[in-house]
Image (spheres, rainbow, N blue to C red):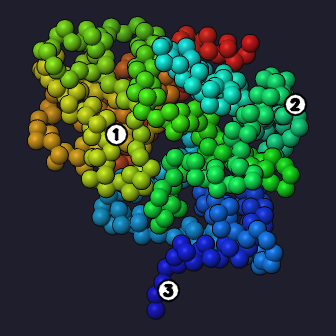
C-alpha cells in the first residue's frame, strides 16, 4: 500500500507540538554545521513555520535530532509531484525554473563591484527621481550608509575565506563587528541598519507578512524564496545571528531594489528602467563602440514604430532594457499561459514588438543579434525557451528570419559589466561573445541558463571600469 503524502496542515500540527526556541536553536546548529548535508531552503521553511505555529509555552514535546530531521525531510518531500509533473511532461526548463525559485537563487555570488554598481544606479545616475531620498525617508538610512554596512558585514562573514581568520564564520555577529560599524557610520545608523534587517523580535509574523515575494497558495510555499532575504538577521538566545551567508548574498545583491519596489511600487520600477538604460550606456561608451540611441533610431524609421534602446550598426546588435522579474507565483508554477501573461509586456514585447521589427527595418539582409538587459539575473538567459512556449500567441512569430530567437540573450546588469571588461581587455569582441554563447547553447552538454557562465572562459579576475571609479571611491573615503 502506498503511504499517503503528508499534508501541510499535518506538518504544522507536528511543529505546534514543539518549542519555538528548540526548533530555531536546532536549525542554527544544522545550518552552522559544516558536516551537515541538509537542504537549507527546507530548514528556512521550517524556521518560518516555527515562527508561525510552534508552541511558545510549556508543556511541549522534547525535540530530538531524529524528530527534527524528520520535519526537515517532510518539508523537503512535500509536494514533490509539482516539479515532477513538469519533468514528466518533458518541460525540464520549467522544472528547473521552479527549482531556481526554491533553491538555486541561494547560489547567488557577491562580486566586489555590486556595491559600486548600486551606488551608480541609485545615486549617481538617478536624475530627477531620487531613490536615495525615498529610501532614506522610509528607513532613516542613506543608500550609501546602507551599502557601507552591507559591505562591512559581508567582509566580516568572509574573513576565513580571505585568509584573515583561523575560524569559519559561525553565524554570530559579535561586538567587534558592531564596534567597527559604529566607527564607520555611527551608533544610530548602525542600529537602524540592524533593525531594518532583523526579524521582528516581538512579533515575527509582522516580518513574514511584510515580505512581498511570498506565495499565497499554501501547497507551493515550500518552493518560495525565503523571507529571510529581507530579514537576514535574528535575535536568538540574546545574541544577534546571521541566518546564513547564502541568504545574505542575495540581500546584498537585491535588497534595495526589492525594498523600493515593495514600498514605492510602479513609480519606482518605471523610473528605474530609465536609470538602467543610462547605466548600460556607460558601458557602451567604455568600450568605444559606435552606437545609436532610441532617438537616433527614431529618425531612421517610420513614425509610431516600436523602437529599441540601442543599436550597434557595425555588429547588427539591437538592445532593449527592461526592469523586469517573474512574479513569485509564476516562478514556482511556470505554465505556458502564466509565463506569457507575466512577460507579455516586458521580455516578450521586447522581442516580438521591438527587436524583431526594428531589425527587419534597419538591416533586413544581415544576421542580427538581440540583447535584453534586466537588473536581476533571470533563469531564462536563453530566449529560445521563452519563444517556444509563447510563439503561438503571436500571429507573425514564424517571421523571425531577421532576428532568430537563438540569437537573443537575456543579460543582467552585473553580467553586462563583465562583458564590457572582456571587450575592454580585448579578449573578445561583442560578436565573439554572442557567437560562442549561441554555439554553447546549441547542444545540451554546453548550454547555459546563466549568461555569466559563458564568460568564464575569458578569465576576468579584476574589474577596471572607469564609470565605477567614483563609486568605488565613495566606499573607501
Q: Is tag 2's residue or tag 3's residue first in the polypeptide sequence?
A: 3
Q: Position of residue 156 (x, y in %)?
A: 78, 35
Q: Nearer the viewer, residue 422 or 303?
A: 303
Identify residue for label 1: 382
- Residue 348 visible here: yes
Q: Quick check: 102 left or right of 92?
A: right
Dividing the picture into quadrants, the one containing residue 342 is: top left
Vertical comparison of 90 with 240: above or below: below
Q: Residue at x 14, y 32 (%)?
A: 401
Alpha-carbon neighbours of circle 2 within 10 Å: few (<14), some, or many (≥20)? few
Q: Give me the disc on residue 3.
A: 3
- Is mark 1 in CB contact (under 8 Å) with mark 3? no
Front residue (pair 412, 119): 119
Q: Position of residue 421 (x, y in %)?
A: 50, 18
Question: Which quadrant does the C terminus fall into?
Answer: top right
Mark 1 or 3, nearer chain start: 3
Query: Residue 163, percent across and down?
Result: 79, 34
Q: CA distance from mark 2 to mark 3?
A: 55 Å
Query: For the residue labelled by badge 3, is the local secondary structure a helix, a strand or a loop?
Result: loop
- The label nearer to you, 2 versus 1, is 2
User: Could one spot residue 155 in this view of the protein?
Assistant: no
Residue depth check, mark 1 versus mark 3: number of the one nearer the observer: 3
Residue 246: x, y in percent? 64, 45
Callout 2: SS: helix
Residue 189 occupies quadrant: top right
Name the residue located 54 percent from the left edge and 23 percent from the top edge.
131
Q: Which mark is residue 179?
A: 2
The picture quadrant where one finds residue 193 is top right
Amino acid at each position: 500500500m502506498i503511504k499517503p503524502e503528508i499534508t501541510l496542515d499535518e506538518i504544522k500540527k507536528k511543529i505546534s507540538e514543539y518549542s519555538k526556541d528548540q526548533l530555531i536553536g536546532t536549525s542554527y546548529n544544522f545550518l552552522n554545521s559544516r558536516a551537515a548535508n541538509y537542504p537549507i531552503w527546507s530548514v528556512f521553511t521550517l524556521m518560518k513555520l516555527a515562527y508561525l505555529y510552534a508552541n511558545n509555552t510549556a508543556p511541549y514535546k522534547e525535540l530530538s535530532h531524529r524528530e527534527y530531521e524528520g520535519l526537515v525531510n517532510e518539508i523537503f518531500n512535500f509536494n514533490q509531484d509539482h516539479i515532477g509533473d513538469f519533468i514528466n511532461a518533458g518541460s525540464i526548463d520549467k522544472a528547473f525554473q521552479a527549482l531556481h525559485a526554491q533553491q538555486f537563487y541561494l547560489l547567488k555570488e557577491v562580486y566586489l563591484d555590486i556595491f559600486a554598481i548600486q551606488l551608480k544606479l541609485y545615486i549617481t545616475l538617478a536624475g530627477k527621481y531620487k531613490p536615495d531620498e525615498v529610501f532614506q525617508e522610509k528607513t532613516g538610512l542613506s543608500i550609501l550608509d546602507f551599502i557601507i554596512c552591507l559591505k562591512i558585514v559581508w567582509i566580516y562573514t568572509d574573513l576565513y575565506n580571505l585568509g584573515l581568520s583561523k575560524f569559519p564564520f559561525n553565524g554570530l555577529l559579535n561586538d567587534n563587528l558592531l564596534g567597527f560599524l559604529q566607527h564607520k557610520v555611527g551608533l544610530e545608523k548602525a542600529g537602524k541598519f540592524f533593525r531594518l534587517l532583523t526579524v521582528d523580535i516581538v512579533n515575527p509574523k509582522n516580518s513574514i507578512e511584510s515580505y512581498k515575494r511570498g506565495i499565497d497558495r499554501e501547497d507551493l510555499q515550500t518552493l518560495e524564496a525565503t523571507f529571510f532575504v529581507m530579514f537576514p538577521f535574528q535575535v536568538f538566545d540574546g545574541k544577534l545571528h546571521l541566518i546564513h551567508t547564502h541568504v545574505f548574498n542575495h540581500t546584498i545583491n537585491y535588497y534595495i531594489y526589492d525594498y523600493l519596489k515593495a514600498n514605492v511600487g510602479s513609480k519606482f520600477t518605471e523610473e528605474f528602467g530609465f536609470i538602467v538604460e543610462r547605466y548600460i550606456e556607460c558601458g557602451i561608451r567604455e568600450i568605444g563602440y559606435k552606437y545609436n540611441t532610441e532617438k537616433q533610431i527614431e529618425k531612421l524609421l517610420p513614425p509610431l514604430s516600436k523602437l529599441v534602446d540601442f543599436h550597434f550598426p557595425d555588429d547588427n546588435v539591437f538592445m532593449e532594457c527592461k526592469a523586469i522579474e517573474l512574479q513569485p507565483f509564476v516562478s514556482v508554477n511556470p505554465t505556458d499561459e502564466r509565463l506569457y501573461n507575466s512577460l507579455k509586456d516586458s521580455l516578450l514585447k521586447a522581442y516580438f514588438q521591438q527587436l524583431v521589427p526594428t531589425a527587419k527595418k534597419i538591416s533586413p539582409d544581415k544576421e542580427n543579434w538581440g540583447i535584453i538587459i534586466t537588473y536581476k539575473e533571470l533563469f531564462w538567459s536563453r530566449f529560445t525557451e521563452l519563444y517556444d512556449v509563447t510563439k503561438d500567441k503571436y500571429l507573425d512569430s514564424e517571421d523571425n528570419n531577421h532576428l532568430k530567437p537563438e540569437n537573443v540573450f537575456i543579460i543582467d546588469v552585473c553580467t553586462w559589466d563583465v562583458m564590457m571588461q572582456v571587450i575592454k581587455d580585448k579578449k573578445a569582441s561583442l560578436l565573439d561573445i554572442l557567437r560562442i554563447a549561441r554555439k554553447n547553447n546549441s547542444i545540451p552538454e554546453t548550454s547555459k541558463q546563466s549568461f555569466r557562465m559563458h564568460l568564464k572562459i575569458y578569465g576576468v579576475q579584476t574589474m577596471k571600469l572607469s564609470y565605477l571609479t567614483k563609486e568605488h571611491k565613495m566606499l573607501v573615503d
